[in-house]
Amino acid sequence: MSTDAIATDPGLLVEARGLVKEYARGGDTVRVVDDVSFAIRRGETMGLVGESGSGKSTVARMLLRLIEPTAGVVRYDGVELLAIGSRDMRGMRRRMQIVFQDPYAALNPRMKVREILAEPFAIHGEQHSATKDHLEVMLREVGLDASALERYPHEFSGGQRQRINIARALALRPEFLVLDEPVSALDVSVGAQVVNLLRELQRKYGLTYLFISHSMPLVRYLCDRVAVMQRGRVVEYGDCEKVCEAPRDEYTRGLIAATPEMPVFSD
Ligand SMILES: Nc1ncnc2c1ncn2[C@@H]1O[C@H](COP(=O)(O)OP(=O)(O)OP(=O)(O)O)[C@@H](O)[C@H]1O
């Protein structure tokens, strides 16, 4: 697909072109992301898979402009994110959110759930929207009841905390969610419930996901397409089912072989 075709395709929400990230390390420059390109269509789930340190989180943070790329282009809904000013970026930011791996670290332990869920509204000057009724609806959407509002994060299990994180991420009704290993820290059965919640929310709101994972079975279950990363580069990219059935790359074959068991999910 040519760059021009990508630029005019309204079905695309996120595009990464030639992303590079370098860090200075001990007098040298280390390239941790090297010429990464892919595109994510509206409403789909793209998997980003690879071993620890392959650059997945760095790519995700560049997409959201939480860190600046050394080189490359990110387009979001046709807009070149790296070219816009902080005011426009603020508007873009509410359309994209991230859910992190560690559901406890991501929640301020001194805030009640009510305050945690109200925070995104306050940041965007929309405190008036954070009514008790609305916060209760947000909680119900992730399978928690209203009594959670007056409690603190430590009073919840890992799975419940991740549900609170998801509720907060959805507060401003974003269209794109980066899910950075959202169930890796959870037991398999609890993780499966959170995965199914994410699928339900995606269907309900037409969300677009970038799902970062080490687990090929999970990626296969959830994703339409997948990019496989090794040492900062994308070594395989394409339709998830095809990549999992007939991986072209030796590294991808290794990842699939390393996680042969399919966890049990129910829809
Ligand atoms: N701020 C930084 N300064 C220097 N090196 C960094 C920085 N952030 C990340 N790195 C390095 O970049 C490489 C890629 O890290 P990254 O977190 O993106 O990998 P990952 O694939 O997400 O790993 P994991 O699965 O363990 O989360 C690693 O070698 C990491 O040490």
Image: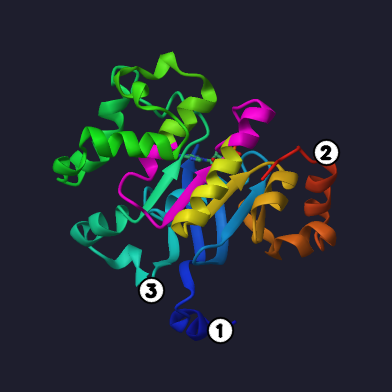
Question: Which type of secondary structure does the marked residue at label 3 adopt?
Answer: loop
Query: Viewed as shown, does residue 177 lie left or right of 83?
Result: right
Question: Which type of secondary structure does the marked residue at label 2 adopt?
Answer: loop
- Residue 201 to residue 136: above or below: below
The foreground one among 27 and 9 is 9
Residue at horizontal 37 percent and vertical 22 percent from the top? 148
Rendering coords of residue 153 (x, y %): 39, 19
- Residue 181 to residue 153: above or below: below
The foreground one among 68 and 205 is 205
Tell me if I can see residue 43 in this picture.
Answer: yes
230 drawn magenta:
no
Question: Which type of secondary structure does the marked residue at label 1 adopt?
Answer: loop
Quarter residue 198 falls in: top right
For label 3, count other residues whose C-alpha is less than 10 Å away and answer few (under 14), some (14-19) or many (20+): some
Query: Viewed as shown, does residue 35 lie left or right of 87?
Result: right
Tell me if I can see residue 55 in this picture.
Answer: no
Please give the residue where the numbered disc 1 appears in the rendered image.
Answer: 2
Residue at horizontal 80 percent and vertical 40 percent from the top? 259
Disc sitting over residue 78 in the figure: 3
Asked if the residue under mark 1 is in contact with the one under mark 3, i.e. CB atoms within 8 Å, the reply is: no
Query: Viewed as shown, does residue 23 lie left or right of 185?
Result: left
Rendering coords of residue 116 (x, y %): 30, 30
Quadrant (top left, top right, bottom left, bottom right) of the N terminus: bottom right
**Amino acid found under the numbered disc labelled 1:** Ser
Quadrant (top left, top right, bottom left, bottom right) of the C terminus: top right
Give the magenta-colored segment's residue range.
166-193
Please give the residue where the numbered disc 2 appears in the rendered image.
Answer: 261
